Image: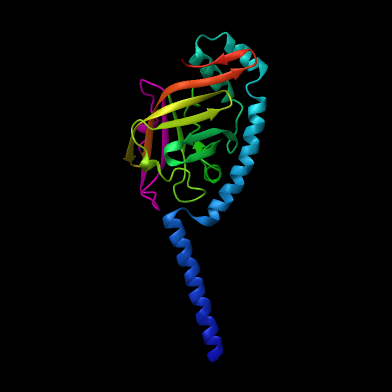
Amino acid sequence: MERFSRVFAVALITAGVVVLADVATTLAWKEPISSLYGSIQQHRLEGQLSDLERRIPSTADLGRASGVRGVRGKVRALARGFSTRVHDGEAIGRIIIPTIDLDVVAVQGTGTVDLEKGPGHYASTPFPGAGGTTAFAGHRTTYLAPFRHLDSLHRGNEIDVEMPYGNLTYEVEKTKVVDPSDVQILHRVSHERLVLTACNPLYSAAQRIVAFARLKRVSFFALDNGRWGDP
């Protein structure tokens, strides 16, 4: 009986150490189990995105866009066409934020399953480059925690969004904490805007932290017959 008690005590201590280690890891970085799952999903999304970039834009897409005036006009036309071909949970592009060391594949949709894969595009908002306010949501502590450091962004930081139809660079305007019910953050403003949202504070869904960024340039779009790009 005494031996059993010792074994049981050691087991409890070991379990406690494991739990504390998991908590410490989550506090210092991000939740390890869901992050492993997120890594697997990101690997799959990389393959989806590569395939997507080989197929889009199609020759027909480029033909329609060629008749539209200006670089941003062409990208806007391509973005609107692209929006009709994607489904929830599918890879749609890549978000890169050098300031917070982020390079992640984004998906369509903001459902629970979608956000377990990566940042998700709010289906109610236009795609990047299509005009208006584009928005993405992402986790801060689980599933790779892509938006963990949104609070570290400052005015002037750049956010690159690489889509199959073009690359767009946004410049951070500000960050703000709002109520979860605040839908005004998704409203159209006088310029093309990118909005990134995540729960706030860490380990709580009581609020939302939001980063607002303004479209700065459509850096390039390569074609067989030339290159489009903002000067």
Q: Quadrant of residue 28?
A: bottom left
Identify the residue at image location x=52%, y=56%: 32
* Residue 89, placed above or below residue 173: below
Q: Residue furthest bottom?
A: 1
Is 230 above or below relative to 54? above
Magenta part of the protein: which range? 182-208
**Residue 11 in magenta?**
no
Please say whether residue 193 is one of the residues in the magenta stretch.
yes
Q: Residue at x 52, y 42 (%)?
A: 111
Q: Is residue 5 above or below residue 42?
A: below
Residue 80 in sight from this viewpoint: no
Image position of 24 (left or right of 174): right
Residue nearest the viewer, comparing 27 with 188: 27
Compared to 118, does 129 lie above or below? above
Q: Is residue 9 left or right of residue 199?
A: right
Q: Position of residue 128 (x, y in %)?
A: 49, 26
For the N terminus, which image quadrant?
A: bottom right
The residue positioned 51% from the left and 32% from the top of the image is 123
